[in-house]
Amino acid sequence: MAGVTALAMPCAASAAGFLEPAGPVAAAQLSHFGTISALMLIVIVPMFVALPLVLLRYRRGGKGTYRPDWEFNWGLELLIWGIPVALVAALGTALWNHTLKNDPYRPLGPAPLVVEVIALDWKFLFLYPEQGVATLDLLVLPKDRPVTLKLTSGTVMQSFIVPRLAGQIYAMAGMQTQLNLIADATGDFTGRNTQYNGLGFATQSFTTRVVSAEDFASWVTGAKAQPAGLDAAGYKALLPPSVVNEPVIYGRFTPGLFDQIIASFAPGMAGGHQGHEAPAGTGTPAAAAPAAAHQHDAHTPEAAQ
Amino acid sequence: MNWELIFGQIKWTSFVFAGMIENPSLSEAIASGAGSIAVLGALGTVVLLTVKGWWVPLWRDWLTSVDHKKVGIMYIVLALVMFARAVIEAALMRAQQLAATDGGGFLSADHFGQLFSTHGTIMIFFVAMPFITGLMNYVMPLQIGARDVSFPLLNAISLMLTMAGAVLIMVSLVVGQFSTGGWSAYPPFTGIEFSPGEGVDYWIWAVSLGSIGSTLTGLNFAVTIYKKRCPGMSLFRMPLFTWTTLCTSILMIFAMAPLTAATIMLALDRYAGFHFFTNGDGGNMMNYANLFWLFGHPEVYILILPAFGVWSEVVATYSSKRIYGYTSLVYATMCIAVLSFAVWLHHFFTMGQSANVNAIFGIATMIIGVPTGVKVYDWLLTMVGGRIRLTTAMLFHINFLLTFILGGMTGVLLANPGIDFQVHNTLFLVAHFHNMIIPGVLFGMFAAVQFWFPKAFGFRLHEGLGRASFWCFAPGFLLAFFPLYWLGMMGATRRTFTWSNPDYLPWFALAMLGAALILAGFAFMVMQIVVSVRRRAELAAPLGDPWDGRALEWSIPSPPPAWNFAVLPQVTARDAFYEAKKDGTAYRSPAAYEDIEVPRNTATAPLIGLFACAWAFGLVWHIWWLVIVSFVLIWAVVIARSFATHTEEIVPAATVKAANEAFLAAVRATPGVTRDQEMTAANRGRAIPESLEASAGALAAGAAVEVTR
């Protein structure tokens, strides 16, 4: 029945997943998928070959010799324990190398473009601190430049993925996770939340638009010219669950908004945070400070405080 | 009177039929239809019981029974009833996804959310768990030569608590909504802030009741295996099904506790304003994820290990041969049981921990593949040198070997964090765990039913219809789930009620076809049971050994008497009964009979179950008087029981002797059958061991050894 999957391979050209990687991370994931699958055939093929033969030979009325008391053989025993052990050693080595090399927290080059991602109910908010612009349900990235996404949630836990660029990572309120990626092809790629979060979940996707460096610069210029801005009150207005049909571009946003959102979930914030209130208009410097300093060693998703 | 004081938060709009009246739509009509089926099913049962006058036998012979065999059968009946509901839900979801290109379809997002939540919750906690628990209940004491489990009343209480949880889920079809948080119910989504209302509370209390029941079962079975083995039954002479039962029981003891803790903590968050798992205020949902999967991963081995035990029994029996690598299989099972506690983190590689942590847990996960692979090849080697009969159970086993290793392959793929990052939360994951649970656990249980049904009821199941069900189930599974691997790799997310990628359509169509075949398989299975009951005279095998069995359970009549063994057997080897048949020492009359003490029936367990169900219902709907009253009643029953001194009754030696000698006489008077006659009416349950078939003449003449010991 593996045949179903295997036969389907050629006609997959239009598939949207990581089968068509558009960046080195997704490409490495796909090739690792191939490596592991191929190695696993070492234990799978023998079963598919041997079982029909055994059934044919030892069926009632077959040619096999009936040995009702045969129950052990050291040679076979070493084989059925030894081969899986050796295989797992090989698989484990491949796993170890791939996992450490492709750690989503590992920056993929100098001077990455930092985008802060806030998962909201049924939409994603993207903040570009370097560029000073923000978007809703549209992630525009320059081709070939390393990107560092910092993620948090303003609501329940979500899982962020753009399959053709990189794998997913959870976004959790009061915590920050990270995802590094590079796009090496231009185009529009679908990204989405994969963790169920209510009625709008099925349609919570967004467009990731990879453009050339020049186009990115001009996009930023155009975005900055947008009249709309995003401040704490604007963010608060985004909190009620809703599905965004058309992406929104904000020409500016309150600096430090991302850290304020994380900090707003910290225990003991003034007035608690009933109903996960939006951060105060002017974020307290203490609350907003740490993210940059933590970039390398803050490996675990941790509260900003 | 104050409405809320009496009825809590139940309003007339809480009833499922109100939705149909206020907001008619196909989705609401289906919900109302399901509610009606639940109500009519309950009413129909009541009417049937009344008309047939079965209330008294039901209460006297079944509900109040503490006999492990009856408890086991009730568990399995519960599992099959719940399976009927959850498999229909699965087909509904598939139909919705097939119809749902670009927002089409007939189910609302909310209804779909409830469907995948109840489907998962029911299939794990109220189908798979009662199925394996029922089977272990029935078979394990017979295999170790015991008269019952160590704590028969506790056993019945476990059953009734599980049943209370199942009833609660069925009630949620009619009154109120169920959770949309999935079977794992991750907060903060399932917290009160994001999921107000009764849905998550239904999940919490149904699962809590089930998990407490399972904890008690684990304790009970582990003690039983340690303390109640018959003379000579050393650990390494135990049948493999008993070994896997032991490992599963140990897992249950340790793994159910974190689940109970997690559900109670979630309840405290929801009811009492605690902040274990809330957003902010010190709450952290990562603790829930850890607790849940600290249960959740061992849970999959809790389910699969008994099925592994079934496969070991099935393959040896239908190959008429000793199991290959018994010791190897035992150690492999123990390895799996221990390692199952060391891999839980692979359920959330995507939570942002360091690459080293992910890699360690990924490798630990792969290491579990080693003992599992060993087992699979042990089963293959068991067939080598055998004489294989392709019975229904054996067909399921062959199908299992082939499909399970493919599921193992995708499991190893998922154990790689880098691959998991891509396919986590997609249909690839859904395909993987169904690939393990359906051919492994579910078909294992179906094979077990084919195998042990004649033991429990004294007649075989109709073989032709069994094969028909297999030939629907097996290809149905492949069609229903292999397309999902591909969909997942294309990026199709799980739990979506609508989608817009046209490439998905043909794959969803295949999956729907598979779902239809699975439904057909289930229909054949029901038909098989009905037809077999009707033709029970022709299929009768009361002499207890229709398959040329190997372990002790085949040495006693079918169905076995309440006391199981007239005299506790003395075991000197593995495959004790098979060896005895070969040596001609089977079916001997014992030298002497003794009085046997058996536990009396008691209303304790069903009353505790009833009040626990009322208590949970009160909690779901905030009906505080009911919560208090039923809680007090539960403990009143327990205290009242502690004063009961007359809890056992004596079966006189004469009665035991009469029954047993009648059985032995019937066996001796019946010629044994060869395996060629296995599926014919000649098979009354007296087997000629395959290895003696050449010299069958003498034995078949009924010259069975009759020696007193």
Image: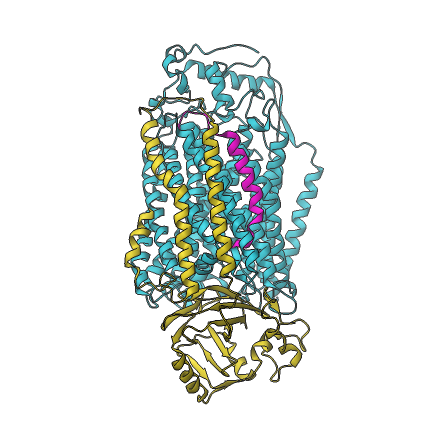
Chain colours: A yellow, B cyan
Task: Give the camera-side residue of B294 and B135.
Answer: B294
Overall secondary structure of the magenta stretch? Answer: helix
Residue at 33% of width from left, 57% of height from top?
B508
Q: Position of residue A150 (x, y in %)?
A: 53, 71
Q: Position of residue B28 (x, y in %)?
A: 40, 63
Residue found at the far right of this picture: B643
Q: Note whether residue B617 is visible.
A: no
Q: Position of residue A177 (x, y in %)?
A: 55, 67
Q: Note whether residue B221 is visible.
A: yes
Task: Give the camera-side residue of B324 and B144.
Answer: B324
Q: Indicate yes or no whether the magenta region holds residue A176.
A: no
Q: Which residues are magenta?
A: B319-346
Location of residue B560 with respect to A123 vertically, above or below = above
Residue at 46% of width from left, 57% of height from top?
B420
Location of residue B48 with respect to B421 vertically, above or below = above
**Relative to A211, B615 lies left or right:** right
Task: Give the camera-side residue of B159 and A144.
Answer: A144
Q: Position of residue B278 (x, y in %)?
A: 61, 66
Residue found at the far front of this picture: A110
Location of residue B347 with respect to B562 vertically, above or below = below
Q: Indicate yes or no whether the magenta region holds residue B338.
A: yes
Tally of marks? 0
Residue at 50% of width from left, 26% of height from top?
B553
Q: Quadrant of the C terminus of chain A?
A: bottom right
